[in-house]
Image: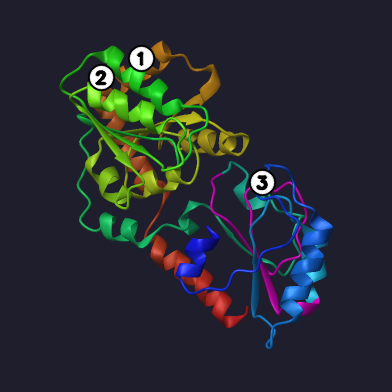
């Protein structure tokens, strides 16, 4: 990630003595101290500090106040207080408007909900002239994020093989860091209508081409909804559970629950249900589009305008 940021001609400052690969919480005090040092070394006071980390909260942010003009926080847990001027939570929850009551200052501007989802420009382009989905499932997209440590991709392929249908084609996408990449590729090479893709740059187009997606409840939820792609969701992380339930409650997807508790046979039955119920799939597509509202580019513009204006 640091190399990628550098390639984009941005400066990266690394906090010393922090093992970013250990999976453990960071040393918040050390991080706060080093961040203060870096910010105070800048010739000009930064207009905005954007904070995006589950381990950081009000105490850390207050330490940075003297060194920046404004603070923006990106969060979706609503489990700790923040000292910020702007908060972004792009996820959907039943009590979305009230989740941060008492957790942020009264003056804080809150951008809440999937209308403010950060999507790559390819999704905006793909939505232009988007085809109307009629509900028939002929092409399925399987994607469980870049790593898929629980190997849900292989489970899904096994479930699809149980259908034994030559009429369904399957696009399978994995990341370069997926530890089961070779296994997935082997399965796809053995099945004529399974197509393997790795580290793609055209995810939006693959979603446009698909009639149904099978995947996790992470950020791809909003990518799928934005393009009206119906989905079967398998929850693979704690912070996906509430989002998956809310999206399913809105009729924009079907939440199958925790991935670890879903057997291959159960997943196969869920896929068969989707194939056998085109009216439900068509309705799901419309609900997904409705959930995202109008143009996300316009709502993202409002965030940028707030940042530029220093509101």
Q: Is residue 223 above or below residue 82?
A: above
Q: Do labels 2 and 3 touch, CB within 8 Å?
A: no
Q: Mark 2, mark 3: which one is toward the viewer? A: 3
Q: How far is disc 2 from disc 3 in space, using C-alphas?
A: 36 Å
Extent of the magenta region: 66-92
Element at label 2? helix
Which percent across, then down, holds residue 115? 46, 56
Q: Which mark is residue 276?
A: 2
Which percent across, then down, holds residue 231? 37, 34
Which percent across, then down, holds residue 216? 47, 35
**Mark 1 neighbour class, 10 Å CA radius: few under 14, some 14 to 19, many 20 or more:** some
Residue at coordinates 54% horizontally, 21% vertically from top-left?
Answer: 260
Which percent across, then down, holds residue 284? 34, 35
Q: Is residue 240 above or below residue 35?
A: above
Residue at coordinates 54% horizontally, 39% vertically from top-left?
Answer: 243
The answer to whether 301 appears left or right of 97 in the picture is left
The question of residue 71 being in magenta is answered with yes
Of the image marks 1 and 3, the number of the one nearer the N terminus: 3
The question of residue 82 being in magenta is answered with yes
The answer to whether 304 appears left or right of 59 in the picture is left
Element at label 3? loop
Of the image marks 2 and 3, the number of the one nearer the N terminus: 3
Residue at the disc numbered 3: 77
Residue at the disc numbered 1: 269
Element at label 1? helix
Q: Is residue 77 above or below residue 135?
A: below
| Extreme-bottom residue of the structure | 43
The answer to whether 30 appears left or right of 187 in the picture is right
Residue at coordinates 37% horizontally, 30% vertically from top-left?
Answer: 182
């Amino acid at each position: 990630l640091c190399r990628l940021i550098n390639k984009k001609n941005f400066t990266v400052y690394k906090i010393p003595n922090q093992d970013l690969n250990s999976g453990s919480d960071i040393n918040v005090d050390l991080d706060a101290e080093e961040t203060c040092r870096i910010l105070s070394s800048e010739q000009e006071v930064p207009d905005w500090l954007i904070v995006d980390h589950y381990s950081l909260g009000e105490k850390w942010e207050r330490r940075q106040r003297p060194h920046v003009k404004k603070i923006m926080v990106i969060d979706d847990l609503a489990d700790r207080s923040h000292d910020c001027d702007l908060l972004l939570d792009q996820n959907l929850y039943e009590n979305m408007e009230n989740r941060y009551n008492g957790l942020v200052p009264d003056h804080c501007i809150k951008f809440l909900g999937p209308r403010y989802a950060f999507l790559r420009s390819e999704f905006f382009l793909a939505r232009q002239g988007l085809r109307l989905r009629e509900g028939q499932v002929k092409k399925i997209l399987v994607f469980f994020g870049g790593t898929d440590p629980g190997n849900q991709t292989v489970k899904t392929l096994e479930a699809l093989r149980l259908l034994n249908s030559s009429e369904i084609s399957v696009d399978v996408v994995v990341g370069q860091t997926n530890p089961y990449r070779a296994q997935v590729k082997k399965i796809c090479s053995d099945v004529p209508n399974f197509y393997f893709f790795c580290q793609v740059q055209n995810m939006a187009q693959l979603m446009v081409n698909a009639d149904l997606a099978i995947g996790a409840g992470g950020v791809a939820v909003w990518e799928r909804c934005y393009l009206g792609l119906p989905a079967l969701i398998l929850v693979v992380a704690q912070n996906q559970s509430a989002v998956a339930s809310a999206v399913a409650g809105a009729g924009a997807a079907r939440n199958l629950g925790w991935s670890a508790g879903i057997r291959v046979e159960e997943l196969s039955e869920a896929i068969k249900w989707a194939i056998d119920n085109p009216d439900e799939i068509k309705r799901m597509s419309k609900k997904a589009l409705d959930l995202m509202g109008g143009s996300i580019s316009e709502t993202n513009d409002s965030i940028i305008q707030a940042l530029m204006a220093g509101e």
